[in-house]
């Protein structure tokens, strides 16, 4: 298979057949990725991306956007290459261990398959908003050198339910062809719709076919479904996944770790960090991140280069106050 691809690459190059060259190159990336050679796949992908960069474009005439699908799929899937790694996310020990292990399993796919087992690739992420589900999907994509393929739920659920089933099939047909991390965010949208009065029967059929598609998927891609409302999902849904992974709000220790991560560029007294983490325990990672950014903005607008305790207390105070005025999210 690989020898054929290399032959095709050479032929296309010699004949200056750019579309064929691009196709063969993409297949080669997919083949490496599918074999679990993520490092090699990443290197090839980088080369291709460089070939597509504006400076190179004029010379080779080769334009490659290997993450973004075309045609009907372009509306359903948003593809991107991710630079996030484990060092960019703060997690509780259990969650970190599960995710690191899953990355390890997928890197060792060939050797697992040699023993007749598969890496776990169908994951359910659950937990309150702003606790890193989307970020973790990016981290897995970044670590595995695979594109993150985010499913656009608004496009998926067209007004015509018949089209929704077709959309789903299109996405699942893409998974073996384009190895990636397929991210179904707000997965509970499916479950929620199930309760709607209109088209109940039709929606049930879609959910059933969705679950069957998940079941029968044997691609090298990862499938991640994320939900803030785990209570809306029934057992039939959980059974489909190889692992359910919890994302929780940070405790004090995790908040300290997040602050250190987000404020690494500044010399902030560790006592200040501890004080903030103590005072604002219960805040989400996303709100804490936003507060840090807001504090940095205040500093920059004042043309200072030192981030002060007052900057931080002020921004955390404001964001926490807004949160208190809002009704608690269902989770
Ligand atoms: N566990 C985390 N570690 C580090 N940063 C986080 C974490 N969770 C959230 N963030 C920050 O908040 C932003 C939004 O979080 P997101 O991953 O979209 O949360 P969710 O998908 O659970 O709603 C992220 O882009 C990141 O900047
Ligand atoms: Mg999210």
Image (cartoon, rainbow, N blue to C red):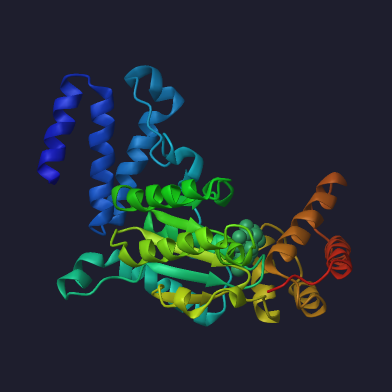
Residue at (18, 25) in percent of width and height: 12
Quarter assignment of residue 325: bottom right
Count every numbered label the image shows and give the total.
0
Foreground of the two, 325 or 174: 174
Ligand 1 lies in quarter: bottom right
Quarter assignment of residue 118: bottom left
In the rendered structure, the answer to whether residue 296 lies left or right of residue 147 reads right
Residue at (22, 57) in percent of width and height: 35
Is residue 283 something one can see in this rendering?
Answer: yes
Residue at (43, 29) in percent of width and height: 53
Residue at (15, 32) in percent of width and height: 8
> Residue 224 placed where, x, y %?
46, 63
Figure check: 99 above or below 5? below
Is residue 68 something one can see in this rendering?
Answer: no
In the rendered structure, the answer to whether residue 104 lies left or right of residue 17 reads right
Figure check: 216 above or below 172? below
> Residue 292 placed where, x, y %?
75, 60
> Residue 327 placed where, x, y %?
83, 69
Figure check: 146 above or below 288? above
Foreground of the two, 196 or 288: 196
Figure check: 269 above or below 262? below
> Residue 311 placed where, x, y %?
86, 60
Foreground of the two, 323 or 254: 323
Foreground of the two, 303 or 176: 176
């Amino acid at each position: 298979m690989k020898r054929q691809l290399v032959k095709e690459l050479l032929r296309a190059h010699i004949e200056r057949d750019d579309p064929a060259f691009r196709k063969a190159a993409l297949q080669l990336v997919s083949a490496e990725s599918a074999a679990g050679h993520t490092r090699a796949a990443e290197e090839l992908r980088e080369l291709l991306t460089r070939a597509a960069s504006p400076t190179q474009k004029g010379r080779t005439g080769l334009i490659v956007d290997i993450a973004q699908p075309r045609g009907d799929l372009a509306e359903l899937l948003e593809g991107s290459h991710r630079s996030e790694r484990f060092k960019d996310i703060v997690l509780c020990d259990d969650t970190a261990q599960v995710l690191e292990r899953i990355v390890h399993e997928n890197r060792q796919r060939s050797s697992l398959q040699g023993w007749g087992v598969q890496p776990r690739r169908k994951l359910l992420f659950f937990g309150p908003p702003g606790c890193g589900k989307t970020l973790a999907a990016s981290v897995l994509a970044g670590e595995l050198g695979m594109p993150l393929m985010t499913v656009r739920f608004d496009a998926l659920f067209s007004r015509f339910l018949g089209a929704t089933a077709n959309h789903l099939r299109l996405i699942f047909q893409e998974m073996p062809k384009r190895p990636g991390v397929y991210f179904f965010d707000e997965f509970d949208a499916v479950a929620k719709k199930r309760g709607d009065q209109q088209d109940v029967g039709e929606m049930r059929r879609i959910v059933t076919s969705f679950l069957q598609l998940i079941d029968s998927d044997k691609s090298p891609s990862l499938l991640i479904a994320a939900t803030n409302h785990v209570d809306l999902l029934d057992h039939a849904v959980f059974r489909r996944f190889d692992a359910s992974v919890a994302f929780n709000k940070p405790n004090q220790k995790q908040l300290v770790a997040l602050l250190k991560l987000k404020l690494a560029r500044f010399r902030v007294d560790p006592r200040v960090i501890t004080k903030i983490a103590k005072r604002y325990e219960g805040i989400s990672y996303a709100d804490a991140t936003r507060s840090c950014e807001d504090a940095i903005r205040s500093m920059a607008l004042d043309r200072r280069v030192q981030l002060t305790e007052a900057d931080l207390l002020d921004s955390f105070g404001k964001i926490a106050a807004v949160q208190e005025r809002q009704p608690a999210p269902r989770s």
